[in-house]
Image (tube, rainbow, N blue to C red):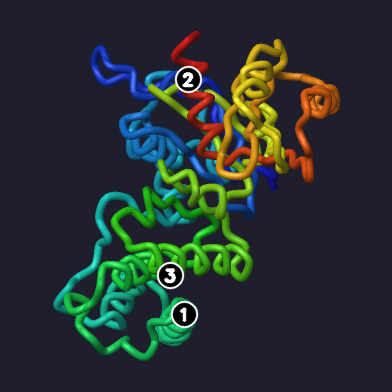
Amino acid sequence: MSTFAIQTDQLTRDFGSLRAVDHLTLQVPAGQIFGLLGPNGAGKTTTIRLLLGLLPPTSGQVRVLGMDPLQQGEAVRQRCGALLEHAGLYERLSAEDNLEFYARIWRMDAAARKARIQQLLEGLGLWERRKEAVGEWSRGMKQKLAIARVLLHRPALVFLDEPTAGLDVPTAAALREDLLQMVEQEGITIFLTTHNLSEAEKLCAGVAVIRNGQLLAQGSPDSLRLRASKPRLEVFGRGFGDGLLQNLQRQPEVQTARRVNDHLEITLHERADSAALVRLLLEQGAQIEEVRKSSPSLEEAFLNLLEEEHVA
C-alpha cells in the first residue's frame, strides 16, 4: 500500500483559455491533515474536483489511494468523503434522520448504521440534540453534522473545502479540535483547502501553497516558514535612540529595523551574523537585557512566497 494518499504529476486543467490548475505536482502522505493554501481563485476547488474524478484533467497524472480517478472514479469516490460548497443536509429532518438517510444510501446494514451514527454524533458533541430538526441549528452545528455525514462510511480520505469559513472564532476552534481527534481515532487522511493561514498552522502536518494554479511551495509549516521568511531578532533593553536605529538600518545585513514598544525588531538578510549585530549595538551604547530569535508566522511566510512569485 502506498504511503501517499494523493500523488499528482504535472496536473493541468484548462477552461478554454483559462488555466485553472497549472502543472501541479503534489505528494500527500496518508494519515495526516494536509492543507492546500492559496488566495481566492488560486485553483483549490478545481484541484479537489480533479482528485475526485469529477473533472477530467487537460494533462498530467493523478493517483488517489493508488487509483486513477479518471478511470476508476466510482471506486475512488466510494473510499472518499467530500464536503465542498454545500452541506448536503435536509433541514426539516433531525440530525439522526439525516445520517440515517445517508447511511442507507451507503447501504450500511441496520446495526452498523445505528452504531456509526451514535459514534459520530457523540464524538462531535451532537448526540443530545440528535432529535432536533437541523433547520433550528446554528451554522457551526450544521457544519459538524455535515462532517459526520462525510465520515459515515469510514472513508480513507476526506476532502474539506474551507471547512471553517463563516464560523465564529470559538466554533471554528472547536471544529478544528474535532478534526484532529477524527484523524487520530479513525486513521484517515484529510485534504483541506483554506486561505486561513492561522487555521492551517494549527491543523496541518503538511501544506502546499498555490497561486494561479501553480505550486509555489510544499512542506511542513515549519519548513515553509524557514524557506520563505527572513531571520528576525527581538532585542530588549534600553538606549535604542534615533542615532542607533539609523546606524542599524545602514548595516548591509539588516533588511529592516524598528522600535516596537520596549524593544527593537530587526529583520535580517539570509545568513546574517546576528552575534556581530548584537556586538555593534553594545558598541553603540545600547543596554541589552535579552535577545530573542523570533519565529515568523505561516502567514508571513505565505505572503513572502506570493511576493517572490509576483516579482519573478
Marks 3,1: beta carbons within 8 A: yes
- Residue at 82% x, 29% y: name it: 282
**Res. 152 mark:** 3
The nearer-to-camera label among 3 and 2 is 2
Left or right: 267 with respect to 74?
right
| Quarter residue 73 falls in | top left
Which amino acid type corresponds to the residue marked 1 in the rendered image? Arg
- Residue at 49% x, 49% y: name it: 198
**Res. 116 mark:** 1
The residues tagged by marks 3 and 1 sit, at their Cα atoms, a distance apart of 7 Å
Precedes in sequence: disc 3 or disc 2: 3
- Residue at 43% x, 70% y: name it: 152
The residue tagged with tag 2: helix, strand or loop?
helix
- Residue at 23% x, 82% y: name it: 94
The residues tagged by marks 1 and 2 sit, at their Cα atoms, a distance apart of 47 Å
| Quarter residue 146 falls in | bottom left
Precedes in sequence: disc 3 or disc 1: 1
The residue tagged with tag 1: helix, strand or loop?
helix
